Amino acid sequence: MPNSVISKILALAVVTLPLKAAADDAEIVAAEARSSGSGWTFTVTLRHGDTGWDDYADGWRVVDAGGAVLGTRTLYHPHVDEQPFTRSLSGVAVPDGVDTVYIEARTNTDGWGEARFPVGLN
């Protein structure tokens, strides 16, 4: 294989390797819901390899089965030294008749992850 081809392959690997390493969704470790006077309170625990401002879990949301967003919790800073970490969101209005909602997590590098964590509403 000519050296120019090898050089191009190595250059491409060097450029794409950091992108693949940073492409990790936040893991939803646990979630629970509690009915309160003004709606529902959701408590969610996330785990992510936060490295600082360049790569961190920056939010989670509550959605119904059809994907309609019922509430969003924005995380305004990295949690490098606090893994996993738990945050809550209160006052979430859930339509009558909905007995299960889902938690989705987001990172500032990759956006919303594909995983949905089901939460039963009792």
Image (cartoon, helix red, strand yellow):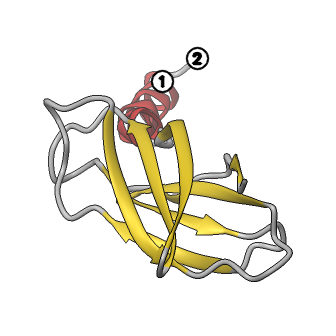
Q: Is residue 81 left or right of residue 73?
A: left
Tell me the CA gap for discs 2 and 1. Answer: 7 Å
Q: Amino acid at mark 1?
A: Ile
Q: Is residue 108 left or right of residue 41?
A: left
Residue at x 60%, y 55% (from the top left corner): 103
Q: Residue 78 versus residue 103: which sits nearer the camera?
A: 103
Q: Amino acid at mark 2?
A: Met
Q: Is residue 2 above or below residue 119?
A: above
Q: Residue 20 versus residue 62: which sits nearer the camera?
A: 62
Residues at discs 2 and 1 in contact (Cβ within 8 Å): yes
Q: Is residue 35 above or below residue 120?
A: below
Which residue is farthest top? 1
Q: Residue 54 versus residue 74: which sits nearer the camera?
A: 74
Residue at x 29%, y 48% (from the top left corner): 56
Q: Residue 68 versus residue 95: which sits nearer the camera?
A: 95
Q: SS at mark 2?
A: loop
Give the image location of residue 4, x and y in percent. Answer: 44, 31
For marks 2 and 1 on the same chain, the one whose residue lies earlier in the sequence: 2
Q: Is residue 101 above or below residue 98?
A: above
Quadrant that contains the N terminus: top right
- Mark in front: 2 vs 1: 1
Q: Quadrant of residue 76?
A: bottom left
Q: Which residue is mark 1?
A: 6
Give the image location of residue 83, x and y in percent. Answer: 27, 29
Residue at x 38%, y 56% (from the top left corner): 109
Quadrant that contains the C terminus: bottom right
Q: Which mark is residue 1?
A: 2
Q: Is residue 3 above or below residue 112?
A: above
Residue at x 54%, y 44% (from the top left corner): 31
Give the image location of residue 19, x and y in percent. Answer: 41, 43
